[in-house]
Amino acid sequence: MFGHVYHTGYMTDDVARAVAFYERKLGGQLLKQVTQPDGTKMAFVKFGESEVELIEPGDKSRLGGKTGLIIDHVGYYVADLDKAIVELKAKGVKLGAGPTTSAMGYRMIFIDTDVSLGTRIHLTEKK
């Protein structure tokens, strides 16, 4: 069901500084940057075979006073999201609302954190 890791999502207090780190130090390429209606800034950076999602929340209190890069979630590719949802539900895996569409335009759904031992995990179908 699972493919490779799509990306690791990081919360940050300064998305521009985080993008600069990935571009200048790791040879990254900015794929897309968006600002959500609530002021949250998101950037997607590819470097080598990997990608990261960098999230600067509109409400910085979500960071709990932390700065830098804070792991928020891991996204995994699935070839067929609808099939994955059926298989997971058959195993008793509770899912979040959705599927939804990511800022990159991909279909995705989160696994409920009560099931995933507190870790935020989403499944992403890229077509």
Image: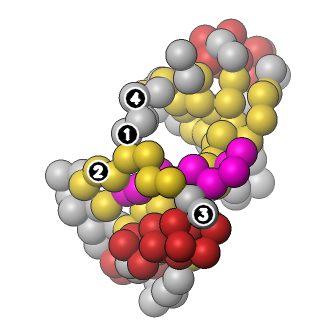
Image marks 1 and 4: residues in contact by CB distance under 8 Å: yes
* Contact (Cβ within 8 Å) of mark 2 with mark 1: yes
Closer to the eye: label 3 or 1? 3
Q: Which of marks 3 and 2 precedes in the sequence?
A: 3
Mark 4 residue element: loop
Picture layout, residue 91 above or below residue 28: above
Q: Amino acid at mark 3?
A: Gly
Compare residues 127 and 22 and report the one nearer the observer.
Answer: 22
| Secondary structure state at the residue bearing disc 2 | strand
**Residue receiving disc 1:** 103
Three-letter code, disc 4: Gly
- Viewer-proximal residue among 112 and 18: 18
Q: Earlier in the sequence, mark 3 or mark 1?
A: 3
Callout 3 secondary element: loop
The CA span between labels 1 and 4 is 5 Å
What residue lies at 80% left-to-right and 20% top-to-bottom? 1
* Residue placed under numbered mark 2 in the picture: 34
Query: Which mark lies nearer to you, 3 or 4?
Result: 3
Tell me, yes or no, whether the two marked residues, 3 and 4, touch with CB atoms within 8 Å: no
- Horizontal relation, residue 108 to residue 103: left or right: right
Q: CA distance from mark 2 to mark 3?
A: 21 Å
Instruction: Name the front one of labels 2 and 3.
Output: 3
**Which of the marked residues, 3 or 4, is nearer the chain's N terminus?**
3
**Residue 113 placement, left or right of 4:** left
Residue sitting at x 42%, y 78%: 17
Q: Residues within 10 Å of mark 3 (few under 14, many from 20)?
A: some
For mark 3, what is the residue? 27
Q: Residue at x 52, y 66 (%)?
A: 23
**Count of labels in the image:** 4
